[in-house]
Amino acid sequence: MTPSVIAGLLGAALVGLGLYGLILHPHPLRKLLAFNLIGSGVFLVFGIVARRGAAAGLRFDPVPQAMIITGIVVAFAASAVAVALILRLSAVGRRVTLDPEVPTRPDGGDAK
Amino acid sequence: MSLLPYLDICLALLVVAVAFWTIAARDLFASVVGYVAYGLLLAFVWIRLYAPDVALTEAAVGGGVTGVLLITAGKRLGGLRNVGQGERPGFGLSLVAGVLAAAVAGALCAVILMLPDPPPSLAPEAVAAIHGAGAGLGNPITAVLMSYRSFDTMLEKMVLILAVVGVWSVGADNAWGGAPAPFRVSKPDAPMVFLAQMLAPVGVLIGIHIFWVGADEPGGAFQGGALLAAMWMVTMMAGVAQPPRVDARWLRVALVAGPAVFLVIGLAGGVVAGSFFAYPPALAKPIILFIEAFMVLSIAAALPMLVAGSPGERPDR
Amino acid sequence: MTELWTTTPGGYLIVLAILLPLAGIILSFTLGGRSAERVALGSTPFGLALACAIALHVGRAGKPIVYVIGALEPPLGIALRADGISAIMLITTAVIVTAAALYARAKFATPDGIRESRSSLIFWIMLQSIWAALIIIFVSGDLFNLYVALELLTFAAVPLVCIDGRPETLVAALRYLLFALFGSICYLLGVALLYGAHGTLDIPLLAQRVQSTPVVWTAAALMTGGLLAKTALFPLHLWLPPAHANAPAAASAVLSSLVVKGSFFLTLRLWFYVLPGLSADQAAMVIGCLGSAAIIAGSVMALRQARLKLLIAYSTVAQIGYLFLVFPLATGAQSWSAMSWSACFMQILAHAFAKAAMFFSAGLLAEALGHDQIARLGGAARVLPLTFLTIALSGLSLMGLPPSGGFSAKWLMLQASIISGQWFWTLPILAGGLLAAGYVYRILAPALSDDRISLKSSPKRSQEVLALGLAMIAIALGFMPQTFSDILEIGRPIAAALP
Amino acid sequence: MTDLFPILLVASLGTPLAFLAACFVKGWRRQVLALQWLAPTPALATGLAGLTRAPLTYDLPVSGFTLRLDPPSALLLAGAALLWIIISAAIWRDRQPDNRWGLSWLLTMTGNLGVFIAGDLVSFYLLYALASIPAYGLFAFSDDGERKRAGAIYMAFTILGEALLLLAFAMLIAGEPHGSANIADVMAALPTSPWRDAILGLIIAGFGMKMGMIPFNGWMPLTYSAAPIPAAAVLSGAGVKAGVIGLLRFLPLGLPLEGWGDALVVMGFLCAFYGVAFGLVQQNTKVVLAYSSISQMGVIMAAFGVALVKGQAGAALEVGFYAANHLLVKAALFLTIGVLAIRGGRLSRATYILAALLALSLAGLPLTGGALAKIATKAQFAGGAEAVLATLSSIGTAMLMTHFLICLATSPSGAAQECPAGFVPLWPGIALGAILLPWAFYPAVGDISYAFEWGTLVDGLWPVALGVGLALILRRIDRFLPRVPVGDSIVLEEAAFGRLLGIGSSFKALDARLCQWSAACVSLLLITLALLAASL
């Protein structure tokens, strides 16, 4: 088992864990954490791709590594926007949940 | 052979365990803390993958700034009553979700083990390009980020600006123009102030150093900028510095400086070097450093603003 | 084959088209206040001109125009490539963004006495960001670059959803953001696998290298799944109706007519440009079935909505379904694939213009009447004739009645499904038309009755004319000459394989 | 001179379109609508000129549309144009309907005239839709519940018919090897098309909906009773003929097709007797006429069926003549309702005799246009079961028309307000014209002297006399007849539709379930795995 294989399996495990959390946790902040777990799992997959691509005197392929750095920044920005939305939601006194509310208005939609 | 493979396996198991804790913890705050620890552990994995640049980024962002962001948010949400805790998912759904997640992870494992051998790689091209007429930088990652995939990098900085605007946009209408508030502490702690005053200058120096050496060694604009950002956040937490108003002109200029300079130089490349985003070979390194300097500024301004949140929110008690 | 990776004459136009809105964002953000609006409005004519110039170049050259950024060739560098479909989409985007900008002036002008207002600044910056992101999506030749553009698009779209700050819009925005992030992370995972398998992310280069291996198919499945989530294909549409129905009219129009098409466009790029050589009939069938389900379920749900904007949003869910029929109908080098290809783009265009016109009109109605309850529209057509003419014309296109772009699209799609022997697709196509007639009827029939209704305020004539103009374009698309499908074929890999 | 004819052909469609365009010029609309009776004049000229000419196909430049005129369509075009001119002129001379109604009128007129000369699939479909959909505006813009209902049902059948035809047309063009949309080309390719039977089924069902074929007949009585008199006149006269021209164009008449022909014969006669039977139990004069239309369209369908069985290519003109006669007479009958209602109770004997002649013309009373129509279709209904059934249908029509005349004389009618008074002085002329005009056209179809032969006269007279007698007997037992709601089967269809709507709520529940976050995420993973499984 080389480090890259271990890291690959680790990445897959993190994706799986994250998916589970993302599907099931009712709280949006927990979902966000889960999303970040999936994200780091994906970056690990990039990471082993970079590691496997060691060649020509380099111990890694620099292109995927550059992509990871870009990806981490983007993921962070996404988390920040999501956190801002969650905080704002709780500030306006709304139950913080993602599932649709029970419609308050009766549905008048009686098709022709 | 050596102990290293066992260490790797232990590290991986530890990471999985912490990740599991993050998902499974009952308490929101506990899981946030778990996530911060997870970010730091992951940095070690990156080092084992010979990815020091990524390790630095992961430590600074994954562990550091994201940690502050989530802990602040977790603290504020933890005290609130209106967080849906009652709606635990049913057993059937948990089972389905578990099976599906396991299936996806399993498929992914299989596919990762199936990746072709010998692996395709752009490392030779990158090395050749660095030594050739390309960027003339010692750190191939910086070369890729700033030269070959400069377009991605510029877009990523645009994403940061948009994220800042997005974070600001959720504020209340009448608060617009004010400063974001969550860092403001009513009575600054003496040790915190001391720490900020001592740490900040050192941190700033280290940050600038990381950016400067990034041209040839691990490090670069993002890692350096992230450290500067952390220092600014520390000073704001300590009350030594005040968060700026969102309509402050200098803040806006600092935020856009990186992409703006990048864009102007990219355009100028069309005239001077014959192609947009091309650098004259002799001047490639100085130009890249010049752009990166502004990038550092933008990143140092953007990250704290992302953590600080929208203007005018009152801190909870 | 190296001509795929060398800058062609006119290639610089692509870079300028991207940099224009990016510079606009930077300027708008720095200057703030009223300047944001001025910058956004001022740049639209140039953007439109650039889009037309690119289309002209592509049409005249008969092959894609390419720009290699920094003269650094793929696989290490990034190449931008405008082909036939890019050119058509660029023009569509420019027209609709321009119309949205003009329409939004009334609502998002900075009020007097304030230096800068939140909603106006956000709107003008995000509008330009959406434009920039879409342009990149239409012309980028690199899958990772496309990921960043996709994220740019999400980051621009989400704040528009909650721009008025009501709690329900915040929930809608959060749902949208999280689900879109889920989608993009799936996409990114696929990208990582593709790079791991073939060592490049440049589209034509990948197309030469890909083989039918489990790695490639896993990557394709993940990327497709992610993109479908962002396109809100049924049953992944949870975020779309609340997001599109709660945004202000100008934003809804852009979100519904353009933003969802961005990720759809990428799906097309993936299947028809990256993987064209591999046969994936069954996967295409799966996508086609989902599309059919979207047509039926979306239309039925639209029929049952009480709010006009929700009805229009569900109609988008349905209309998106039609687009995905292109997967079973256009794969492989068959005689009918060009027909399905034109049908798909005709549907994209027709829906884009008709839906933008619909949302504009819904906005006008809501302002004029003070509500958007369909049950209370009785007699409204008497007092708002121009608005209802717009709704009727765009409804014509949504139903697929001639002459309209919607009709041309369905006409070609029906023919393609019959010729290809996949007659079963005709059922959802026809049923969708019938149901669409039902929901358009639900809007129009009460409005055309003789009931009395009073206006809160009369709508601005200029806004009404803008909406009508877009609806007329949707109708005029029905008269599109043959050159339209010729342009669409420019640079399509499968086209080369056809006799 | 030969070069002028294509110009005339283009003008017959171009003039109404120009009027339509002029409506959108600021300030012109009112005048344009008032003058729209001029719009069909080129179509009238074209129709008259085309009666005796060889078929002409003319490709319009740029648009890719094709126009086509042959004697059968010329006959229908001339009749329709004449009808539109007279009725439009009378309406706008008398009063100014509102612009919305006027515009619907002009749109319907444009589509209706155009459908007779459309020569390719796309323009036919377009004009057919134009002839059908805006007609909604002629009666359903109202806050009256019954009219709204009629409008909704009319629209439902129209759109359903359009959908069936769209599929049929797509199959037609798909079967044409060169991708031509020209009707002549696609019809030439039809016999060898792999989808021949599906196409014929869809064509018959689609146009059958327009012609009130059972079980799609319910909309017709509802619509005609909801529509004001002039609108009912043009819809029943010219509007329904869009279905006839459809069958004329899209049934492969030169080709013996036993199965489809027989089916059409059975269906046609079924409709013919169904219309009579259900019409006889109605009291509202407009509804009675609507049922008569169902019956007459059934006869036309049956004639087409026989032509299909026997492979008679010439049947087009003969059936076209039958349809043209019905066009004139039915419109005149609707106007009769209005005019007699305006005049009130004081009806002169002459008026009543004229009305009776007009009504019985439909049944084929000798020396009227109806007799010629019957003679024209004798090639179809000669010998065997068809002849018997055709005679029975004549008797039925005579009964129904007598019933109509009785209702006209006895039951009070609220039609007075719906009919412009301008028709009153015109009516005798219109009625006489409807009876006599077919004589002028007949030479294009056959030998006119046959109509005066003794045997022909007797053959024409006895069924009418028998029908009138039976109707008078029926009147005695009127009280024992069941009362059927207007539109008969539509009541059941509405109930079934209501059931269908119930599915909507289960869709809503499904949608609410799928819109749960966890369900959506699970769907995403399932889709991804399904795609993977499908492509491996």
Image: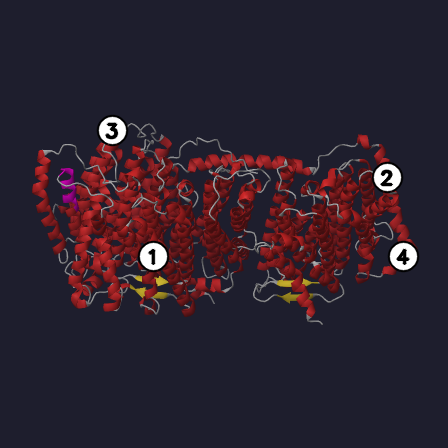
Amino acid type, mark 4: Phe
Query: What x and y, as percent, mark residue C223?
Result: 35, 50
Give me the chain letter of mark 3: B
Q: Which residue is mark 3?
A: B79
Magenta span of residues: B229-239
Residue type, numbered disc 1: Ile
- Do the residues bearing badges 4 and 1 touch, measured as CB atoms within 8 Å? no
Residue B28 vertical placement versus D417 (above, below): above
The kind of residue on which mark 2 rests is Leu
Q: Position of residue C276 (x, y in %)?
A: 40, 59
Q: Nearer the viewer, mark 2 or mark 3?
A: 3
Secondary structure beneath label 2? helix
Name the one closer to the observer, B74 or C218. B74
Q: Chain of mark 1?
A: C
**Percent position (x, y) of residue D47?**
73, 61
Discs 1, 3 touching: Cβ within 8 Å: no
Q: Which secondary structure class fits the magenta region best?
A: helix
Q: What kind of colouring is applied to the model shown?
A: secondary structure
